[in-house]
Image (spheres, rainbow, N blue to C red):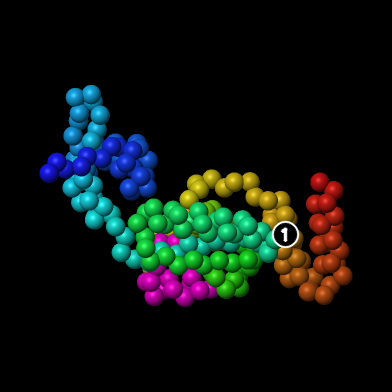
Amino acid sequence: MVERLYTTGEVARVFGVSYTAVKKWAYSGKIKFIKTPGGKYRYPESEVKKLLGEAMPKGKAVVYARVSSADQKEDLERQKQRLLDYARSRGYTDILVIEDIASGLNENRKGLAKLFEMIPQREVEVVFITYKDRLTRFGFKYLEAFFNSQECRIESLDAEEAKEPQKELVEDLIAVVTSFTGRIYGARSHKRRRVVEAVEQAIRDC
């Protein structure tokens, strides 16, 4: 029986990588190929299965999605579906979905707390997010270093952040101002309230 031969595009879809990545694998010897008389690259099924066996993940994947408010539920669902599709394309079958509806500045998020319970147990191989700020607005490098120390990596689908909805950025800005003025003037101080109101008014005037 003649062995099936895969095209470069088919191999790319199997592994969830780009066409160029497959060509690089071929050039480096990572996957053997056959060149047709017309100059096309073809990959024996045995080679694809061999590489697939080596590449198949063995641990648990977590997809973490977050929005700042309940009226962004549709965006939350889009995030989750996109992350699930990506995790599956990478070969993961043991996938846990964790979500939060809270500011990226909120340190008491239930979903994030659950993630922090799992990471030290070495239960998670990878955490998939759409953007870095879905995990935290500030201090991402600290989180990444901690996760890596527990043999878990973070993969962000988008290297560059899309422009965020103004509402979410405004809410985070006001939260920062409220926190710092509370420390300076006291939580119930009139000065604190005036500063926060001035910032809110300045934003409305922009």
In the shown orientation, is residue 147 left or right of residue 133?
A: left
Compared with 26, 170 (above or below) is below
Q: How many marks?
A: 1
Residue 204: percent from left, percent from top: 83, 51
Compared with 46, 199 (above or below) is below
In the shown orientation, is residue 156 left or right of residue 53?
A: right
The residue that disc 1 covers is 171
Amino acid tagged 1: Glu
Residue at the farthest front position: 1
Residue 120 lies in the magenta-colored region: yes
In the shown orientation, is residue 120 left or right of residue 77?
A: left
Q: Dot 1: within a 10 Å radius of its alpha carbon, few (fewer than 14), some, or many (20 or more) residues?
A: some
**Range shown magenta:** 113-127
Residue 67: percent from left, percent from top: 62, 60
Residue at (12%, 44%) from the top-left corner?
1
Residue at (45%, 67%) from the top-left corner?
96
- Front position in the image: 199 or 66: 66
Q: Quadrant of residue 22?
A: top left
Residue at (20%, 30%) from the top-left corner?
35
Q: Secondary structure at mark 1?
A: helix
Q: Main secondary structure of the magenta part?
A: helix
**Visible residue check, residue 200:** yes
Residue 197: percent from left, percent from top: 84, 61
**Visible residue check, residue 137:** no
Residue 77: percent from left, percent from top: 57, 59
- Front position in the image: 175 or 182: 175
- Front position in the image: 201 or 50: 50
